[in-house]
Amino acid sequence: MSVRKLLLLTLAVCLIAAAGTVLTVRLLQSGGGEPGNAGKATTGNGKAVSTAPAFAYTTERQLVLMRGDDVLAKVSRPFDKADSAKNQVAWTADGNYVTMLAGAPLLQKEPDAEELITVDTRTGEQRRHPCPKCSTIVAAGPAGVLAGGDSGYLRFDLDRPGDGKPVDGLPVTQAPSFSPALLAGTEHLTLIREPTYAEDGTYEEGLTLSRPDGSNSVNAGFFESNDYMPVAAVGGKTERDTMFAVAARNNPGICFSAFPVYLIDAGGAITGTDLSAAAPPGFVANKAGGGMDVNDLWWDSERRLHASITSWTCDETKAAENEKEVPFSAARPWRLEGTKWVPEDPAPASSVRVLDQHSSLSLAIPDCVGPVAQPDLLTYCHTGKLDLVRDGARRTLADGVLAVYTAPVAAQAPPAQPVDIGRLAGAAVPGLCEHPAGTLVGGSLPGIAELEGGVQLLAVQSPAQAGALVAAGDLTGDGKNETAAVFGCSQGGVSWPNAVVVYSPDFTVMGAVDLGGLVSAEHSDVKRVEVGNGRVLVHWMSYEGAGTCFQQWTASIRWDGRQLKVEDQAETRTVPGC
């Protein structure tokens, strides 16, 4: 958010309040589903709609929920054009509900009149729940929402009838602020912001991780910020799979400004990222070269982090701060690889959301860097055009769009496919740990002397973890399932790094990836493999023999038509000194 956008906050509130908008809620459906959809869902009145992935977008007057080309629901309520903090939309972790507050302050109503509006993404059914004094919401639990403000919090389970239940133990933010107290949430964890002043008088954002029931709060650090913090969360099967990404602009109103991005894991550990490739020439954070804006952060279904980043240089011959900004790079997508940001799609975009292998959403809002000659900056600098991109073809869905939303990453992941463990336990295996290739018997490679180690299918050796160590899905695009399986092996009683072996539908070996070739560590143990969007996603931990230097990693494995390719390797948790 540039300084210009911050200065327009007050004007935005006045204009919206003057409009005297009356809140109405209505449900609209349209026919004519998207070609190629696999089937149809049914709304509350029996009308069929597309089963394509759901998505939503907001304009100044409404939220629109869609599946494919079908409008599943429209919710009419005012949204603030300049202050995105007043426009929170929470999508439950199971993907089944989109929720928002009714916007009592924008409707000139008393805080006690605030309501939570929920929309079922399968049917379009809408409900209201009393949410007095609520000003902030995030997902909590599989089908729940946590809502609250300076008077406390309520938790709603949307799969059960009834109103919200009070939650104790969460920090209550009472300081005046543009940003919501609840920044982001997954099924297992909530990220909460607490503004504070440091001893030197500078303004900081203190972040706390907590479970949705208020237990096990962990301090996630303090960040210098101007109270505007883009944030993105990604969940998983367990609490420890949760990861948050936050961006914090250091110096609002100053041309030389930094906008660092940090990763926060489930334990509160913070990892910085390297934005140097996105910086303008001569950039020195908060001192020289220019500045950057992080417009948006988002995770994809393979747990890769993306951002839209704008940058500029500074013309010191100008007097006014906003006139000093000289555009260098327009808003465009970047991707985090390890801890470094790399450029992605060159097409300008403020936000991108992937729907499936063939389609994505792209929202382009003008950067408004430097002087902008427009009659209505409030609209021009905060709304844009939303396009649907399908197989390279681009089609505009709406203009005047403020933000776009899709189901959480965990909710978008395809369902696990069954694996014939018995057949896999007798399949061929390539050479691993310097042992020759062969055929498994009961999940182990025969013919290896006891003192020379062995090769084992870990799904057989650890049946309780079998669901995490074997995964199936279509990697070649032919509609048939390939299988990824994790193997452990050793030499002379010392375990070597795990390997991931990929099998064709008839259990012929397609290839193998030795994690020892990806990370220079004595041990690498796979925690989970997943198959989705034509890739195998591997989560693993590396460490040295003495149980030191623990690091966490992810990487994706893709079949390029001839062999397996490892891409997007990323260190998700760094230990100093490793």
Image (spheres, grey):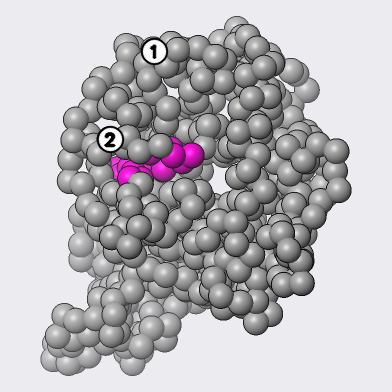
**Which one is in front, 25 or 193?**
193
Decide whether residue 191 is among the magenta residues: yes
From the viewer's perspective, is 217 left or right of 563?
left
User: Which one is nearer the viewer's eye here, 301 or 258?
Assistant: 258
Task: Identify which residue, 253 or 86, lies in the foreground.
Answer: 253
Looking at the figure, which quarter contains the C terminus? bottom left
Task: Give the number of the disc on residue 112.
Answer: 1
Quarter of the image for residue 166 reads top left
Number of numbered labels in the structure image: 2
| Left or right of residue 35: residue 445 | left
Residue 332 in view: no
Q: Disc 1 or 2, which lies upstream in sequence?
A: 1
Q: What residue is at 28 percent from the left and 85 percent from the top?
A: 577
Q: Helix, strand, or loop for circle 1?
A: helix
Q: Residues within 10 Å of mark 2 (few under 14, many from 20)?
A: some
Kind of residue sitting beneath label 1:
Asp
| Residue 149 x/y as whole percent | 35, 29
Q: Residue at x 57, y 65 (%)?
A: 257
Disc 2 marks a residue whose amino acid type is Val
* Gap in angstroms between the C-alphas marked 1 and 2: 17 Å
Residue at point 22% right, 52% down? 218
Q: Which residues are magenta?
A: 177-194
- In the rendering, which numbered label is found on residue 172? 2
Q: Is residue 262 above or below residue 103?
A: below
Toward the front, the furthest residue is 319
Depth order, front residue of 100/513: 100
The answer to whether one can see residue 264 in this image is: yes
Residue 450 image position (x, y, % from top left):
14, 87
